[in-house]
Image: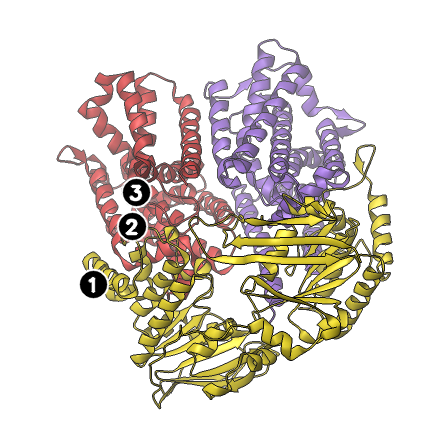
Chain colours: A red, B yellow, C purple
Amino acid sequence: MKNFAKKYGNVIIFACVFIVGIIARPGAFLSISNVTGIISQSAIAAICCLGMTFVLMTGGIDLSVGYLLGFCTYVFGWSTVTCGLPVIAGILLTLAVGAFCGMVNGILVQVLKIPAFIVTLGTGYIIYGIAQIVSSGSAITPLPNSILAVARTNILGLNSVVWIMLLIAVVAWFILHKSTFGRALTSVGLNKEASTLSGINASFTTVMVYVICGITTALGAVLMASRVNNCVVTMGGTDFTFTAITAAVLGGASLFGGIGTAWGSLLGVFTIYMIQNILGILGVNFYMYTAVQSIVILIAIIFENVKNRLLQ
Amino acid sequence: MAKILEMKNITKYIFDEYGKKINGTTVKILNGVNFDLEEGEVHVLVGENGAGKSTLMKILGGNIPADEGEMFLDGKPYFVKGPREAREKGVAFVHQELNLCLNLDIAHNIFLGREPRKNGFVDHKTIYKKSREYLDKFGFQDIDPKTIMHNLSTARQQVVEIVKALSYDSRILIMDEPTASLTAGEIDHLFELIRDLKSRGVSIIYISHRMDELQIVGDRLTILRDGQSIETLSMKDYNQDYIVKQMVGRTITNLFNCTHKVLDEDILKVENFKIGPNTKPISMHVKKGEIVGLGGLVGSGRSEFARGIFGVRNYFGGTIIYKGEEYKKPSAEKSIAKGIAYLSEDRKIDGLIVAKDIKENISMASIKKLFRYHVLNNRLERKEAEAKIKELNVICRSMDQLVSTLSGGNQQKVLFAKWLESKPDLLILDEPTRGIDINAKAEIYEIMDNIAKQGVAIIMISSELPELIGMSDRIYVMRRGSISLEINKNEEMTQERILANTL
Amino acid sequence: MKKRNIKTKYIAYLVILIVACVAGSRIPGFFTVTNILNVTRQASTIAICALAMTLVLIIQGIDLGTGGVMAFCAMVSGFMMLNGMNVFFSMFVGVAVGLVIGVINGLLISRINIPPFIATYVTGQITLGLALVVGKGSSISGMPDLYVAIGNQLFLNIPINTWIMIVLLVITTIILKYTRMGKHIYALGGNESVVKAEGINSGMIKIFAFSLCGLYSAIAGILLSAQMATVHPTQGASYQLDAVAASLVGGVSMLGGEGAAWMSVVGALIIGFLRNALDMLAIDPFYQNLFIGAAIIFVVGVSVFNKNKEMEKAKVF
């Protein structure tokens, strides 16, 4: 029991929210369309949250993902619509931009040893500033049909974005739990000195996790643009960053590094979107979402901390 | 003279970061220590590293509680919960590592936590005035109490710590290696201060490794060895050879059954290696199948030397020749690939990842061979870990157990397993038996002998002289960043000789 | 280290002074009384937030929830006024709410051991959410004239906002320099283990610093909405970064233990004038975020670099 609570705090939180949903409106909540709806809605955030999990596991944090997401949607729109590049080229360019921004974050964190939240707070605003300057605040629409089709196709009853999310989740799971790099990053997150002594290249690992986070954010941006058929830099923002971080934390990732799982982060994202969904079903006004969601998150963080202390 | 302090039968088991006894341990750091202090005397406490001097003083200073034993101050039972309470009762501790806020000025450090107030506001005038008085009283007219701490030299910072301690009207002052980072002139000044304090009736407990200064400042001397108080003698009977003999005391037991043979081929040769910009160069060599001991005090540069060779610390010139080739720009990754392993001194800080399980710790330094096409081979990892656990006799429920739940001895064996798994040809051990019980020690000595038998060269850094002498084929002694002595012959390895060259 | 820090700080001030002079000579109307009064009014809000930030930066904390607190507390007082309550009482309640949020932050950080930036980030989101709830998702306006006057009137030719900022500056300076709590705040930022060894309750210090931080942020938010005659749920968003930037640019150390109240005010004035100059030069307002983000990274980078160099020097060998 003790071990279960220690290991599966995220499942307990998920189950609690799930039970609340069932009690509130069993019919509406448990319908197939509602469940697939929740999954489909959470898909893009889930992809970014998986990237964030990598960063959190090295003991870092990336507060710039929301702004990067907005910037990347614009880059994608600009390259495919304004410049008329092929969609594939546009996607690759967007991913490269995401990777580059991540790399800058990683280098600042690792080389200059500035606390990650300060670096990414700063770069977040820099990216936002650049995004607004290059876009002059305008939106790009409509996008090419080929990319719009991605978000409109359903495969086996699930949106193709969900399938992409699952694919990314499997890749993330593999890297985190089955690869040399995953071993290295949990080690670096738990004990940087011991990792360095064991021949792990801590600098490369640290920079790389930010690059990964940048790439997943850029991918999220492409999918977001294709879903809403619009590219505007204000997409994402701090709310999106907040969702990505707190979902990972709800999913069991430690803010102190070393602990976290791919499936846990997925569960965390589902929990957050489930809360929104329940609020929607209950007819709660949209403007209450932020408050309720963040209160639940605070309770979950307190629960995790107190639980870990009690179980020690 | 009147006895001001008495400590009777003080016993302390190894403890965690909060000073609490570690569950189920039987390892004693202090074992029934007796100690007393007279009014206005300087009582010197000597002993090897790990003899328990600092632990005894931490108990007196209220930093950690004793597990057994009693203390009396002026004949009344003395019991304190923290350093502050100790100081209020007149026992002040000047630590080896300074306990000051470097961002504040001298006066505010002296009055931290008991700032005088006038009308509810901090009375800076009084703070500076009184600090001035304190500094004057102890002969530091030239120090301005408004100076920010980090603008002071280490010696001056220490002066502030002493003045702070005395400002509580302390009757007992504990000084833990106060001269460690002072220059000759500063040491003279400190001794003058100590004499002055004595004349005011302050009693001082003085811990030092420098034998030459003991006679100058001390009145009496107590020798600690292996957590026991061996003897207390008056300075009138000072005899350095006798004291050194009492400090090392033990006869070498039959823990060390070395059967390995030294091969006649150098595996490592280090020439003119400088660990710091201003240290003397080091030249040494290690042969295959040889155990080379590296003695010296903590802080004499042994770990820095080992880390320099392993490639996790910068060095300042010199060449490393490994397996006949020059090893340029060492790094941990390259060293491991070349077959060099380094077991660090503190397993919890940079040796093991205690929040991970045993098998992941064992495979940590040899992770690459567990992967085929970058895919982790779980089965191979388990197999290898199982073999090592059996080979080194790690006592655990399963290999999925977290390392933090193991005893110190078993953690140390996991650390050995991790590095043996990397199949080293040169193994550098930094204090391989620190903080573990005698049985685990014996097992580790056996492991070392077995490794050496396979032709692996071992450099063993150790502060424990019996182990250094018992295990080593050759010994280098380090002092102040360079090698002060090399002993080739077994019969020349005496504890007295080594100790004399470390001090 | 202190000496070098002061030097870099002076260089920063000098650069800013030169920029200001150049800007002043190139921009007509930059050095007029109206403009300067206008800038001080705007900078006062940043300065109050920066004063709040100073307290927590000194103890090695940070407040990433300024924006939310500014919106929610103003929303509460605005809502009460619209429901016919006394203006001053409403403002008092708003400020009290800020204090409560600060206490909650302090408790989360000292008792539950949540890192400051996460605790304040989450409570910031909660307060932002609550501001949306009170305002039903949009801004509220129509507050009494008295309220609007507080945000816009002059007293002795100086905006009331600025007066309040000056009062808070004096109070903060007194707290930091002349009270035990203030001294312990510095000590805590310098070396927590020493503070604990002295038997000082370090948790209490953290709670104090964060509650004062919440209180100040609330005052800033209420003054801001008084000035605008409206309360917008995201009105505090841009002040978040400005407050951090103002403190850091002014010379408060991100690494704790160093800084003073006046430094943050100087930093706030610098940022206020910078924004104003960029506005008057008709430079895209979007560049401002970019500059301020870069300034934060630069300033922290320099102080971290200095500290590392110092540690390198302290090594024995």
Residue C38, can we see it? Answer: yes
Mark 2 vs mark 3, foreground winner is 3
Q: Against C115, is C130 above or below?
A: above
The image's mark for residue A90 is 2
Instruction: Kindly indicate whether the residues beneath marks 2 and 3 are on one polypeptide chain.
Output: yes
Q: Residue at x 65, y 52 (%)?
A: B60
Query: What is the x, y in percent for residue A131?
Result: 44, 45
Q: Which residue is mark 1?
A: B373
- Asked whether residue C18 appears in the rendered view, the answer is no
How far apart are the alpha carbons under marks 3 and 1?
A: 25 Å
Disc 1 and disc 2 in contact, CB within 8 angstroms: no
Q: Give the spatial CA distance, label 1 vs label 2.
A: 31 Å
Marked residue chain, label 3? A
Q: Chain of mark 2?
A: A
Residue type indicated by callout 2:
Gly
In space, the residues marked 2 and 3 are separated at their CA atoms by 19 Å
Residue on which the image places disc 3: A47
In the figure, is residue A73 to the left or right of C122? Answer: left
Residue B72 horizontal/vertical position (percent) = 69, 49
- Circle 1: is it few (<14), some (14-19), or many (20+) Cα within 10 Å? few
Residue at 21%, 45% (x, y): give it: A167
| Chain hosting mark 1 | B
Q: Are marks 1 and 2 on the same chain?
A: no
